[in-house]
Amino acid sequence: MKVWFVTGSSRGFGREWTVAALERGDSVAATARDASGLDDLVAKYGDGILPLTLDVTDREAGFTAVAKAHEHFGRLDVVVNNAGYGQFGMIEELSEQEARAQIETNVFGALWVTQAALPHLRAQGSGHILQVSSIGGISAFPNIGIYNASKWALEGFSQALAQEVADFGVHVTLIEPGGFDTDWGGASAKHATPNPAYDEFREKAAEQRRRRTAGSGDPAASSAAVLKLVDAENPPLRVFLGEAPLGIAEADYESRLATWREHQPLAVEAGGRS
């Protein structure tokens, strides 16, 4: 039996993975900004679930929630940083508050929970941190640039983290979903005030997104894959969810490599060598 700590567990991936863990007999410390959204799971699974109210942007609250979970269950095996949302808006359109709030939730929220969990994982010599990133964490798309920035930051510190904690027996996996039928682009999304100068391009970007997310995946179906990840002896640092991300990544990285190679003479010249 594993003990999970899941942020953003009242909906989307967080809820699906919480239910999957509980169904197989694992225990879950499930957090949400409004823990009443977990009442039905408490009624069904009883002592298997510990509901906790948590705003992940509050560092002290994150440490407190992790400590409560560890005290309650006696250990932590899987930490899932799932809490987050999508901020829509062209880069020029974003307000300071919108930009900061996106980074506070998607980057610092995951950082605080990670920091809070690590002493427990190191002490027990095991554990697995799942960071919910996105295909937008390795690529970038118009009208969600600040969301991309938040996931690129998550990817960066998590890749470094994986190297730092490997000797303690702790694994880190970046989960990079493509389009899934969650409310990421719906009720939970936030939108900047539109600048009319971008109206025409906004329609093009929306059409690109519709094509990119066509045939979106079923969040419930992702649970089996996540359970395999947490049970793996040597889990990967990165893994896609869904069929589309691999093609997006291949095209993006092939383009980057071609550009870097084309301009390698310039790079060498800049280094002072001819």
Image (spheres, rainbow, N blue to C red):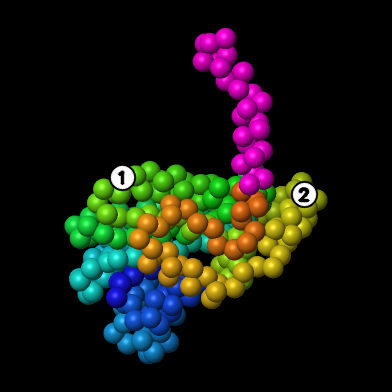
Furthest residue in direction bottom, as rendered: 43
Residue 113 % position (x, y): 34, 59
Dot 1: what SS?
helix
Residue named by callout 1: 164
Q: Is residue 269 magenta?
A: yes
Dot 2: what SS?
helix
Magenta segment boundaries in residue numbering? 250-274
Q: Amino acid at mark 1?
A: Glu
As drawn, is 53 to the left or to the right of 225?
left
Dividing the image into 4 quarters, which one contains the N terminus?
Answer: bottom left
| Gap in angstroms between the C-alphas marked 2 and 1 | 42 Å
Label 2 crowd bin: few (<14), some (14–19), many (20+), radius 10 Å: some
Residue sitting at x 33%, y 70%:
4
Residue 129 % position (x, y): 36, 59
Decide which of 167, 189 is in the foreground and name it.
167
* Residue 39, image quadrant: bottom left
Label located before the other in sequence (2 or 1):
1
Q: Is residue 7 magenta?
A: no
* Residue 173, image quadrant: bottom left
Decide which of 237, 119 is in the foreground and name it.
237
Q: Is residue 159 visible?
A: yes
Q: Amino acid at mark 2?
A: Phe
Check residue 201 in the rendering and tell me which mark sits there, or answer none: 2
